[in-house]
Image (cartoon, grey):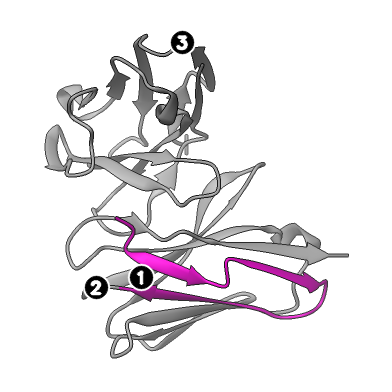
Amino acid sequence: SQQGEEDPQALSIQEGENATMNCSYKTSINNLQWYRQNSGRGLVHLILIRSNEREKHSGRLRVTLDTSKKSSSLLITASRAADTASYFCATDAGGNKLVFGAGTILRVKS
Amino acid sequence: EAGVAQSPRYKIIEKRQSVAFWCNPISGHATLYWYQQILGQGPKLLIQFQNNGVVDDSQLPKDRFSAERLKGVDSTLKIQPAKLEDSAVYLCASSLVAGVEAFFGQGTRLTVV
């Protein structure tokens, strides 16, 4: 079964706008990660946030984590056409696994 | 640094036939994962190895799927016999430490007809 569930399932925005995706998970975690998947580069790790962190930044990416609500969000600022991809959250499910959610499809229109 | 290598990239077989996929992880990575990704869905963990030992295979259909990781390096995933619903992309990934950043191969797209 999937650990994380992303919301929305699909998102379409204009270039330059911000994109926000949410992830909810079921079990306790040690960390939560976000990955991007497109046809050209396959599945690529974006960022990892640990359970004792509340917010983390990497370039145009901002991730928040609320362990009390078992949820995380990924914000992509000033989106570009190249950001068009599927985005997945993944957790370690409290152990040493790597379990993915269903993903959000992001389309950035130029 | 070389990435995770998988072969073949594409495979078409008839149902009830057998097929094998190969994965060569990044050198030094102790953890290796096999995922099945059906079109439109997220990757589903099939099996996880730590060196050459199985950590988790709870979602591996053991009546038809098998996997091994000899000498804690390369790994093979086999399906025998294949069913139509096995059509998917099979992804291999590796990580230095279990449960953190994983590096993925390009995957093998399997079509069962």
Disc 3 residue crowd, few under 14, some 14–19, many 20+, Cα 10 Å: some
Callout 3, which amino acid?
A: Glu
Query: On the rendered image, what quadrant is the N terminus of chain A found in?
Result: bottom left
- Specify whether residue A31 is painted magenta: no
Disc 2 residue crowd, few under 14, some 14–19, many 20+, Cα 10 Å: some
The residue identified by callout 3 is B14
Residue mark closest to the camera, 1 vs 3: 3
B29 and B22: which is toward the camera = B22
Query: On the rendered image, what quadrant is the C terminus of chain A found in?
Result: bottom right
- Judged left or right of residue A10, residue B110 is left
- Specify whether residue A23 is painted magenta: yes
Callout 1, which amino acid?
A: Leu
The residue identified by callout 1 is A32
Which residue sits at x=77%, y=65%?
A108
Residue B2 x %, y % = 47, 34
Element class at badge 3: loop
The residue identified by callout 2 is A29
